[in-house]
Image (spheres, grey):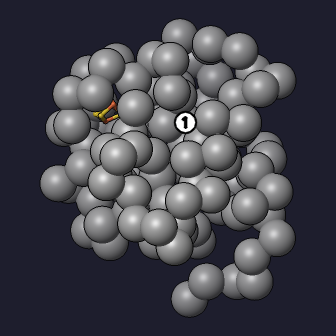
Amino acid sequence: TYVIALPCVDVKDLACVDECPVDCIYEGERSLYIHPDECIDCGACEPVCPVEAIYYEDDLPEKWSEYYRANVEFFDDLGSPGGAAQTGPIPKDHEVVAQLPPQT
Ligand code: F3S
Ligand code: F3S
């Protein structure tokens, strides 16, 4: 799966959302999250992010390793919604993101 890391927090450019052919990039309050089971690893989202927040899981920089867990666990209570257009923005963040001071 692909993972969205720290650079997305409080930026939320959203360019990635339009690129995803399976609509598996979901919007939280301060960041976006890629559904690990719905992502088909096409990689289309990665180059369009202006702040380079998106990585294939094996290429995730070590300093942001906890974002793998953040993307996965974000969906613990959501299951597999089958498309971000259906859920719309989700009013929560994973604790890894929620605990961060404002990123400007
Ligand atoms: Fe975030 Fe980059 Fe997408 S800033 S919303 S991961 S384009
Ligand atoms: Fe979508 Fe990016 Fe995965 S475009 S299918 S989230 S690699």
Ligand 2, what quadrant? top left
Q: Residue at x 75, y 51 (%)?
A: 93
Residue 12 in view (yes/no): no
**Seen in the image, is 65 located left or right of residue 61?**
right
Quarter of the figure with residue 103: bottom right
Q: Residues within 10 Å of mark 1 (few under 14, many from 20)?
A: many
- Res 18 → quadrant: top left
Location of the C terminus (image quadrant):
bottom right
Report x, y in % for residue 58: 35, 46
Residue at position x 77%, y 26% from top? 76
Which amino acid, by three-letter code, is at mark 1? Tyr
Ligand 2 closer than 8 Å to label 1 CB: no
**Which residue is at the front of the view, 79 or 21?**
79
Which residue is at a point 21% across and 28% down the rendered structure image? 42
**Residue 69: percent from left, percent from top:** 65, 45
User: Which image quarter: residue 57?
Assistant: top left
Q: Is residue 71 visible?
A: yes
Reply above or below: 39 against 92.
above
Where is the N terminus found, in terms of image quarters? Answer: top left
Q: Is residue 102 left or right of residue 14?
A: right
* Residue under the image location 60 percent in, 42 percent down: 71
Q: Secondary structure at mark 1?
A: strand
Percent across and percent down for residue 12 are: 48, 61
Nearer-the-camera pick, 53 or 102 = 53
How many numbered circles does the render carry?
1
Q: Position of residue 45 (x, y in %)?
A: 26, 43
Answer with left or right where residue 53 lies relative to residue 85: left
Answer above or below: position of 50 versus 83. below
- Identify whether 57 is placed above or below 79: below
What residue would you read off at disc 1? 26
